[in-house]
Amino acid sequence: MSNSSELITDLTQLARWVQTQSDNGLSVGLVPTMGALHDGHLSLVKSAAQETDSVLVTIFVNPTQFAPDEDLQQYPRDLEGDLQLLGSVARVTAFAPAVADMYPTENSAATDIESNKLDNVATRWEGERRPGHFLGVTTIVHKLFTLTKAQVAFFGRKDYQQLRVIERLTEEHHHNIKIVGCPIIREGDGLAMSSRNAYLSPTQRTQATAIYKGLQAACSMANSKEIAVAELQEVVRKQLGTAEINRIDYVAVVHPKSLEPLELLERAEQIKQLKLGAIILVAVFIGNTRLIDNIYIPPINP
Ligand code: AMP
């Protein structure tokens, strides 16, 4: 199946498109991405096509969410390829603006959307390891919500903390938009799809499979018996160690809403207290490539 994707590159065209959808009573589903699209992104697009009338996929490598020592310059860009991929899954409109359009003045990332106003959801884990990252993310997402007037926005659970931050942003800033969290799409061997996987050498790519193996091992242990959180973290770390992934940023078992660590809780206690299950978050470096992943541990019915 091939659908032609319409490409919008400037804000005037975008405003016209948004107005047309509204005039025709069509709901808009927004899928924000940084491009270099893969099946993970496309699953979000498919969900959007099912749930809304008009799908708008934004392709924008957002400079404000990269720290100076991160991979902004190197980040893969392939607009042609992205448009072709989009056309293969659904009829969508792509919005690929220039940096100067999204940031008319140099410091415009410094909006009032301070990460720390979104409580600990934004300050721990990625927030701590990548200072300024969520300020950049929330700034661009806030702009996109405002510009597109979308009714629904789709984000991947691959970036679980980002999803929670955006849910908080939406509450805090009264955006009238529904946030949908979509499942993590993985390669055949379990590695979570990511545009950054392209940085991995063949050896590193093999090592990277240990991330999901560790998460799975911990998850099945958690489901089969009462277990201390520290033990779960150890299971993940051991698996990473076996693959010689020794630069572990963090392995954390957290509350699925607050993202607070559950370090001292036993599984049984946790179920009683949360009835929500838990999330194991992982961030590692393989060579210079930083990868994140996570898994959901569902609550056990007592
Ligand atoms: P990115 O282009 O990396 O900023 O990602 C754009 C959106 O796609 C975010 O909401 C991501 O969480 C989501 N995404 C990226 N990789 C995956 C994946 N493997 N499975 C599901 N969603 C993903």
Image: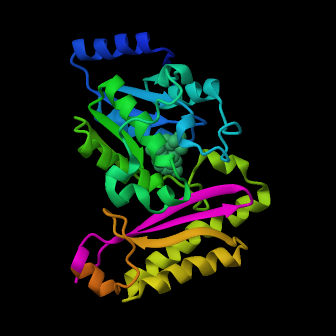
* Residue shown at the point (22%, 81%) measured from the top left: 272
Q: Is residue 238 above or below residue 87?
A: below
Q: Position of residue 167 (x, y in %)?
A: 31, 48
* Residue shown at the point (56%, 76%) measured from the top left: 236
Q: Quadrant of residue 247?
A: bottom right
In this picture, which residue range is highlighted in magenta? 273-302
In the rendered image, residue 278 lying in the magenta stretch gets the answer yes
Q: Quadrant of residue 139?
A: top left
Q: Is residue 32 above or below residue 28?
A: below
Give whichever of 141, 104 is nearer the camera. 104
Q: Is residue 27 above or below residue 302?
A: above
In the rendered image, is residue 43 in sight?
no
Q: Position of residue 267 (x, y in %)?
A: 34, 84
Q: Is residue 81 left or right of residue 126?
A: right
Q: Is residue 69 above or below residue 1?
A: below
Give whichever of 50, 38 is nearer the camera. 38
Q: Is residue 58 left or right of residue 74?
A: left
Q: Position of residue 76 (x, y in %)?
A: 67, 37
Colour approach in the figure: rainbow
Q: Is residue 232 left or right of residue 202?
A: left
Quadrant of the rendering where the C terminus is positioned = bottom left
| Secondary structure character of the magenta stretch overall | strand
Q: Position of residue 97 (x, y in %)?
A: 52, 21
In the rendered image, is residue 210 in sight?
yes
Numbered disc total: 0
In the rendered image, residue 257 lying in the magenta stretch gets the answer no
* Residue shown at the point (73%, 73%) measured from the top left: 244
* Residue shown at the point (53%, 66%) measured from the top left: 282
